[in-house]
Image (cartoon, helix red, strand yellow):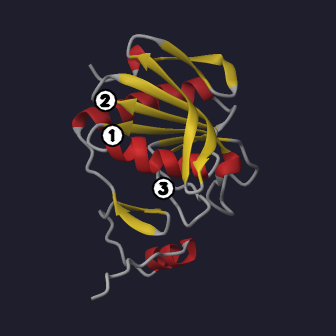
Amino acid sequence: MSLATLKRFTIAEYHRLIEIGFFREDDRVELIRGQLIQMAAKGRAHETCNRKLLRVLPRLLSDRATLQNQSPITLPNDGEPEPDFAILRNRADDYLSAHPNPEDVLLVIEISDSSLAYDQDTKLKAYAEANIQNYWIFNLIEMVLEMYGEPYRKSESEFVYRVKRLASANESVTLPHFSELQLDLSIVFPT
């Protein structure tokens, strides 16, 4: 008896499925290492934190960088996650020619409640493998911001981050690449 093999999709195949309407408009899937992953439903705390970040991040960044919300970034190894936020280098075509890739990404942000274990494991490893330098998780279970930096290869097949810092919901933190920009977490975490 043989074990069934999961179908792995390339990014091109995934894009083709989108083009032909394979997914319904309300389907929430993303491509991680060639596998279609059903994204977790978002709770009220997640949506509240998302709205608060949508208010504060554009004001902080102004025109210093491009901010995208719940949109794809293209990773090597057939990945196209849709993080809650990505802060990107500005590009003249505003990413019309292609989704951002790891070289474009200054910071990836995930907001996590029901998806916390997935974001701390699967997504963390995918972002580290892609050499995303800065990865933040707004951990709504413990009400802390987890800040990861310095991706590295732990073993032949495992990628992680060397540095993990925590900030409580009443602190302020500096945005990576923008030492002059402070994010007040007390106005971001839902209360």
Q: Which residue is mark 1?
A: 116
In-image side of 191 versus 185 (left or right): left
Image spot of residue 120 (x, y percent): 41, 41
Disc 2 secondary structure class? loop
Q: In front of the other: label 1 or label 3?
A: 1
Label 2 crowding class (10 Å Cα cut-off): few <14, some 14-19, many 20+? some
- Of residue 152 and residue 146, the one placed in the foreground of this image is 152
Q: Which residue is mark 2?
A: 140
- Locate the N terminus by quadrant: bottom left
Q: Amino acid at mark 1?
A: Leu
- Of residue 114 and residue 98, the one placed in the foreground of this image is 114
Tell me the residue at 65%/54% (across/down): 101
- Of residue 20 and residue 105, the one placed in the foreground of this image is 105
The number of callouts visible is 3
Report, in whole angstroms, how far the alpha carbon at label 1 lies from the one at label 3. Answer: 15 Å
- Locate the C terminus by quadrant: top left
Observer able to see residue 51? no
Q: In front of the other: label 2 or label 1?
A: 1
Name the mark on residue 81.
3
